[in-house]
Amino acid sequence: MTIPAETAALNELVVNSRHSMVLGKLALQAQIRLLWNDELAKPRNRHPKRLLAFGAKAYSQGDEDGIIAEIFRRIGIESRVFVEFGVQNGIECNSLKLLLEGWRGLWLEGREDDVRQIETTHKPWLDSDRLRVRTAFITAENIDGLIAGQIHGPAVDLLSIDVDFNDYWIWQAIESIRPRVVMIEYNPVWLPPISVVVPYSPEGRWSGNNYFGASLEALVKLAAVKGYRLVGCGFTGANAFFVRDDLCGEHFLEPATAAEHYEPARYFFAQLSNGHEPAIGPLVTV
């Protein structure tokens, strides 16, 4: 059977378009890595105590996996317990790598569809009670009770907060645990020394624009009240890392100020691939 000329031409166009898309994606990945390497090569970022050079991506959106690992390499690991909220479907988040490394913890997610997916893809860890997941729209009024109802016993090593709007107010409200490390989203639009936060509203949600959350300076001030110090920010310019005062010692770059550790928005970095599309399923530890 002879394929009509217009059909053959269309098929060739589709193949060429797919080929161009693949090449385009590869070029984008290469460009992101070049920009990343160029930034890390700058004298500011080569200080041995600055965390930026230790960034790496396994399951995190950006380089958070590597920075978390380096923080705990410096201060040590104790309970291997995490609490994270805003995990979406649990495939691209800040504690999945830790779960695979033998940690256990609690996930809170507001979207029921995402929680149902987690109940399928993460079933082995849920069945063994290494992971607990609860559906909840988090507010300053309910967060402490949600955590206290699920976390008992050893202290929490890592708390990760990413709810896209009320992050500041939610961290302020947490009293039931005093984690050793806190990771929280900041708004890079408000450069230091701007110290502002969106007014609290229990129904507050991100609208997809740059009006959300808190400035890094505001979070540094809140951290000081709660007994924490800023030790670094991720390359994406989205997440800040705080360590409890009593654990910092001389492990981290001083001064522990927003001006010293601020990173600008590089949201394109979240497009950096770590191979194929992220996924998770049953695994055998050997």
Image (spheres, grey):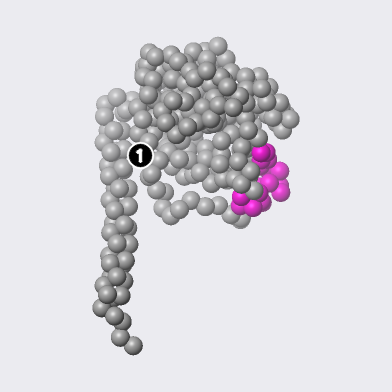
The residue lying at 39 percent from left, 30 percent from top is 237
Residue 98, compared with residue 237, is above or below; it is: below
How many marks the image carries: the answer is 1
Q: State the residue in front, 188 or 177.
A: 188
Residue 69, compared with residue 227, is above or below; it is: below
Secondary structure state at the residue bearing disc 1: helix
The residue lying at 59 percent from left, 34 percent from top is 85
Residue 170 at what x, y percent from top left? 59, 23
Q: Which residues are magenta?
A: 117-135
Residue 104, compared with residue 165, is above or below; it is: below
Q: Residue furthest bottom?
A: 1
> Is 2 included in the stretch rendered in magenta?
no
Quadrant where the C terminus lies?
bottom right
Residue 186 at what x, y percent from top left? 45, 25
Quadrant where the N terminus lies?
bottom left
Which picture quadrant has residue 96? top right
Residue 168 at what x, y percent from top left? 53, 21
Q: Amino acid at mark 1?
A: Phe
The residue lying at 39 percent from left, 48 percent from top is 273
Q: Which residue is mark 1?
A: 268
> Is 121 included in the stretch rendered in magenta?
yes
Q: Is residue 183 visible?
A: no
